[in-house]
Amino acid sequence: MEFSRELLFFFSALGAFNGLVLSLYFLFYVKPKHISTKFLGMFLLMLSIRIGKSVFFHFNHDLSFHYLQLGLTACFFIGPFLFFYIKAVIQPESTIKTTWKYHIAILLPIALIVGYLYPFKTNVELWRPYIIKSIYIQWFIYIIASSLVLAPRIKALFKSNQKVTQLDVWLFSLLIGNLILLSSYYFTSFINYISGALAFSFLLYLLIVFLLFGKNRNTILFHKKNKYMDKKMDHSQASTLIQQLDAIMSKEELYKNPNLKSSDVAKKLHISTHQFSQLLNDNLGKNFPNFINEYRIQEAKKIVLSNEQLTLEAIGYECGFNSKSTFYTVFKKIAGTTPSKFKEQF
């Protein structure tokens, strides 16, 4: 191996190794812990495996097919973890904690089944180009999805009074870096195959720069903190939201769901869970359980007065309570009497 080739191997392999180390850092050791750090760690891990495969294959074309298949399988998960990392940073109050599992639950069996039934070693013609190109297309789709998540920030940059933040620089660099990586692999017949590894090294060292020298690096790399999280809503906004809330509760009868969460109602109002709790506390003087239970007891009173066939226990379940004892306790607390005595009064 010539000196120039040795130097090229060193820098490209070093990038893959450093990426592996950083992925373990984000997955297990970084503080403060946040779901975005897990996605960033998995994203770097998948990239490092893919890049490592590229480096060794470039300098050794006799590399085992098992390593080639491992690298391409890892490539299948680069796009999803990129998408969920960006989504976790931009939308920290989103439902990402559950939705990402559905994606992996679909993609992982596909990767395992295809890899088992059609291994690279005995199905080279199938992998090249069909399966490999399908992997790259899937990666590109997730890059597009990530771009859509970033679209509001991209549009904001064209406003004259909008400043480019470090978070913007980092996320845009990540997105552009992925496009460069994907292009370098997809168009290997036109450009040098090792260029993907070098592009990854550049992206990785950009990350290291942010880690070492970036101001507020925890905010930049993991999730953006909302400066106005503790700021009270103005009166007009709160009044509008309360009207919407009352309409939603009356029309959709959400309180009848015994597993209803504050995040479910907040999603209906298109506000964060924190803002919803703030709305209840500051404007209604109630917490979420009390707010929901008042609707449930109001509904229970209506049913008691209008339906003599249902038992009190059945009425409690109908209104969203999980047990008879809870229904009786809450009814007495809010109505000032037990359900049976309330029924006797009429």
Image (cartoon, rainbow, N blue to C red):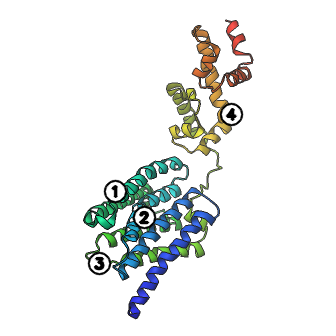
> Residue 322 vs residue 106: left or right?
right
Measured in 3D between alpha carbons, the distance from the residue under mark 1 to the one under mark 4, in whole angstroms, is: 57 Å
Measured in 3D between alpha carbons, the distance from the residue under mark 2 to the one under mark 4, in whole angstroms, is: 49 Å
Circle 1/circle 4 CB separation < 8 Å: no
Measured in 3D between alpha carbons, the distance from the residue under mark 2 to the one under mark 1, in whole angstroms, is: 17 Å
Measured in 3D between alpha carbons, the distance from the residue under mark 2 to the one under mark 3, in whole angstroms, is: 22 Å
Would you name the residue on which mark 4 appears?
286
> Residue 330 vs residue 186: left or right?
right
Helix, strand or loop at mark 1: helix
Amino acid found under the numbered disc labelled 1: Leu
User: Picture coordinates of residue 160 (x, y %)?
Assistant: 44, 63
Tag nearer the camera, 2 or 1: 1
Quarter of the rendering occupied by the N terminus: bottom left
Circle 2/circle 3 CB separation < 8 Å: no
Amino acid found under the numbered disc labelled 2: Ala
Would you name the residue on which mark 1 appears?
117
> How would you rate the neighbour count of disc 4 (Cα within 10 Å): few for under 14, some for 14-19, many for 20 or more?
some
> How would you rate the neighbour count of disc 1 (Cα within 10 Å): few for under 14, some for 14-19, many for 20 or more?
few
**Residue, x 58% and y 72% (percent of image)?**
211
334 relative to 311, above or below = below
62 relative to 239, above or below = below
User: Picture coordinates of residue 295 (x, y %)?
Assistant: 61, 25
Would you name the residue on which mark 3 appears?
191
Would you name the residue on which mark 2 appears?
74
